[in-house]
Amino acid sequence: MSNVLAEGYNAFETNKSPSGRVKYLSDPPSVMALIRSGRLGEHILLVRGGTTTFLAPALSMGAIGVITMSGAPESHLGILSREFQTPCVMTAWLLSSSSRYVPGETDDSHFDEIVKALDGVEVSLDCSDSLVGRVIAL
Amino acid sequence: MTDEEFLALNSIYLKKIATSAAVSASTGLPEQAVERVLAGAEASGRVIDVGQGMLMLSEDGVHAVLGEFSERYAASREDQVVEDWYKRFELLNSQFLKVVTDWQQDGGDLSKLERLLKLVERQVRALGHIIDRIPRYGVYSQRFTQAIEAVDKGQIAYLVSPDVDSIHSIWFEFHEDILTVLGRPRDVAEPAE
Amino acid sequence: MSHPASTGRRLVHDVDLIDPLDVARFGGKAAGLARMRRLGLRVPPAFVVETAACGIYQSEGRQIPLGILAGCREQIARLEAQTGKAFGGDTGVPLLVSVRSGAQISMPGMMDTVLNLGLDRRSVLRLAAASGDPSFALDTWTRFWSMFSDIVLDVDPEVLADGIATERSRAAERLHADTAAALEHRVIEVLAAESGPVPLNPHEQLEAAVRAVLDSWDSRRARLYREHHGIPHDLGTAITVQAMVFGNLGTPAGSGVAFTRDPSTGAPRLYGEYLAGGQGEEVVAGTRTPVGLDAAEADWASIVTELEGYGQRLEQEYRDALDIEFTVEAGTLYLLQVRPAKRSAAAAVHIATAMVSEGLIDPADAVLRVSRDQVKRLVSPEFDQEAVDSARASGHLLTKGVPASPGHGSGEAVFDADRAVEHASAGREVVLVRPTTSPQDLRGILAARAIVTARGGATSHAAVVSRALDKPCVVGCEDIEVRLEERAFVAGGRRVSEGTTISVDGATGEIILGELPRRVPTRNLDALNELLDWADDRSGATLWTEATSALPVELARGTGAAGVGIVPLTDLLQAVGRLPVLLKAIERYSADPDAPEADIEVAVADATATALEPLLAAAGDLAVDVRVPNLTSGRARAWVEKWTTLAPHLLMPLGARRLIAAYARGALAATQKTGHTGLGLLAAGITSAEELEQFAAEVGPELTVGAVLQNPAVLVDATDLAAGGRPLWIDLAELVRTTLGRPEELLYTDSYTELPPLLTQLLAGLVGTDAQTRVGVRLTGNAVTSATALHDLGFRVFSSTPAQSGELRLLLGQHVLEEDPHD
């Protein structure tokens, strides 16, 4: 049976179920490096979500899937993901943890835990539900 | 940095990734001038070509642009008028994001369009109130107006498509712009859930 | 040149006195109100400034023509007299009005409607007293300011709301002269900072609103739109000002909605409800329970009678069933809005046929009034409602998921496609339950009576394919935990193992333990058939329906089918559990095609006869076309063990001649036993007219012989086939698939909207000849949408599932009527 690692808000409902190795991108230079490496399409991108704008280039250049740790489907990134039809799971939380993102009250340990659990893992995204997006271990 | 350089590099900074043609269209600078400036910036390592003519700023480039903002807008950062204007903009911004999301999720229902466009018109009028402080923002008014016209003519791509100078692209850049003028990190400015 | 004041006055009209047809001069809203007034219906009084005013305004450099404002004042005075209320001023119940723009053509940039104009800090108190509801009065007033600031003053209503929050909540706590004054004061402050001095007097506010409408005609966007579409700038917009009425003033008072016919059954009696002392939005929001019109309180009795009268008059005028929004204020009934009523499928059909017999509309109108979806709903077999209620009461409801494809089905739960196919081939009904489905599960979905998935939404694979196949499907059953290794699922705290019968309601999303009996509700079929007969009159279409057992045959008869077909013999054998006989025979003939195997042939003939008898008996005088098994199909590949080792010649349409002879003998025996005289035996997968003749020779002269055309190669012989006199069926989905070279697994997820041009060309060769050959098209799932193109080519005979036949007949009738309404 499927092994759901994390869930979050689904930016939009789609049958597309991209899979790849999770890659955490923490700043604009890492986005640029990934684009230039030509390996953008191999990864599911993981970002904090607050600094969503630096992810825009990845979407333009063909990112296949995105996981954010904060931010709502009603945000610039949500809007862009729908426009590009790139599956996007937002404000994801680990099923194995009780830690949840609360705007203004969450510290780095919450994000670090998620990065630790997901970075480098082979996953697929299930965004077929109208509200909940899922990150599934392959 | 010359004004030309600032406008061109800032344009890439705001768009995050762009072709020189897009920079020219957004800034109003002639293509040749833009190409000249960007070639120079590439040579000095501020701009990087990531393929297919798409340009991004290097860390140095970002640093340089942010430095320009600090210098040019030092006064604005202390100006209560600009601060109040930004608070007003935040209210409009939340409404905008909501209405666009709504429109996208409804499969592009055209009757929601009117509401969206009236919001953008409100933004254009609001920009009129800040032009004396930041004259450069006149360009945004023009861009918004042109995009509205295109949508009214039936070119719906001018609402959200990243391939043209769409309303959402302009708004997205503007948001980034005003935040940078105010010297604010993005995190703080995301809409409340 | 300036116009005298009298001109201005002449441009302002009581809607009672205007021509309801002159939309260009008065705009749609005022014209609509005038139309209702002509019918003697009471609407809240209104006046209109005609579109000519707009032109004068522009040409006079944005000056409101002299006399317009005076004319408006006169009309307001008339409204006051008619309603007994006061506009502005210091005493009396306040008169509130709405202000609307209204051009002949709508365009961007025009002003939105302003409501509740007429309140100020003193009259809001009088409104609170008159209604006995201070929060209603306060809400009405703040809503006015929100709209006025947004629409007339161009100020962000959020900014206003933010700015007055404190004063508003104080007024909400206690609405009194001081809190109202403080609120008004604050409103002026906030708005003045944004846009300058703000009118407080209702007459000035009205003037501002009128000016805003006139200005909006000339807004940038409206201008550009007109230029882009070639609309003249001098058309202008009208301004409609209407008194507002409230369901909480006086007694009796209230708001409600009435339907001129029952929206569920179509029965011709007034149906609806009202909320006493309530406003329209409350009825819609469902926060309070309204009173049914049939159970109206004593003081509402005369109002209901009045509504009935209005309803009848309106139906005569609009020639349709209507929904009427109304408000009663101080015992007076006002109609606010009239629209064609939303109605259930059953109601749609009953209303359409009833109105024809009442002489209100003609049959062609009736055919156009009903939709395909509505017809579909009426012919699907449903669970017996009592059985459902009793199952729920006994706690048999397992769970509820997302309804993805409507319909009702029951069967044994199975968890993979192989098992589904296995059980189905033994004649058992199954329900496929999976975490999710993919194209590899297609044969399982085909074999199942219903599909259930634990995950997924309305656009998932299971949902899309089920809808194409018209099978009930429920997805996203979060509560279901599928345990494939255990061959069971857990839901609602219960464990359901493989083989347990469950029932699926694809419309409500309910999964119920046990079998629920299904029937086609017959109460609507007579009306539906009457309507579909009218549709057939227009299209000239003849419909056959597919069936493999008695229930669908009865349904076919009930819906006026001309025949039963195409019936795959394989399905019939499966239904009587005799498929293994055929599979064994195939293996034997593969080993040696010509060896006489008398016992196997007798067994096959016997099985065929047994399989056909029940169908022919049920069919009675309906013709039946049966297709012999096609060994190259995906199904054959899945079911015949070692299909890959079959001798290749066996895969040719005429490869198993002994088998063909055996089918023929069995078929003949079945016709003799049942006395059925209209059986046709069809060859499958032929590639030439010659092959068809050889097949006919093998079958013998006692039975009618025809063919199912499944690949484009055979269409080269179109002319010969058309002249041959043998019935032909075109398997459209299969032909498109083979023409485009698509794999079977994608058969139902593919949706094409146009036939491949090659196919259209080849098919044309089969029609339009003088021959008496019956040529029909078998349409399944998505292919139904091709029916109109085929009808245009000249095809008139079609076959479909019973569930789709009504839809198809309607589609063709509507198609002909839309092409030529006076046909």
Image: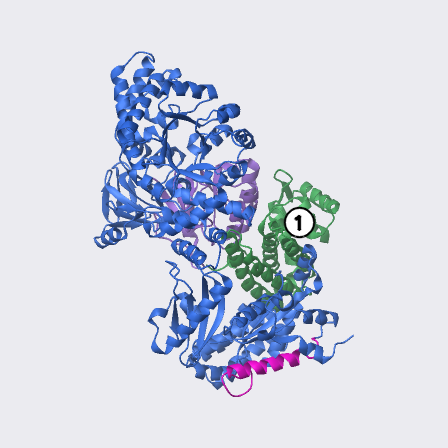
Chain colours: A purple, B green, C blue
Which image quadrant is residue C155 in?
A: bottom right
Most extreme residue toward the bottom is: C91
In the figure, is residue B2 to the left or right of C771? right
Please state the horizontal and vertical placement of residue A16, each as a whole percent of the image: 46, 41
Most extreme residue toward the right is: C1
Amino acid carrying label 1: it is: Leu
Which residue corresponds to the image point at 34% horizontal and 13% vertical from the top-left?
C593
Q: Which residues are magenta?
A: C64-93
- Residue C83 lies in the magenta stretch: yes
Above or below, C237 relative to C64: above
In the figure, is residue C436 to the left or right of C490? right
Could one spot residue A102 in this view of the protein? no
Please state the horizontal and vertical placement of residue C79, each as a whole percent of the image: 55, 80
**Chain identifier of the residue bearing label 1 in the image:** B
Please state the horizontal and vertical placement of residue B30, each as a whole percent of the image: 74, 48
Q: Nearer the viewer, residue C28 or C769?
A: C769
Above or below, A29 relative to C315: above
Q: Return the residue at label 1.
A: B9
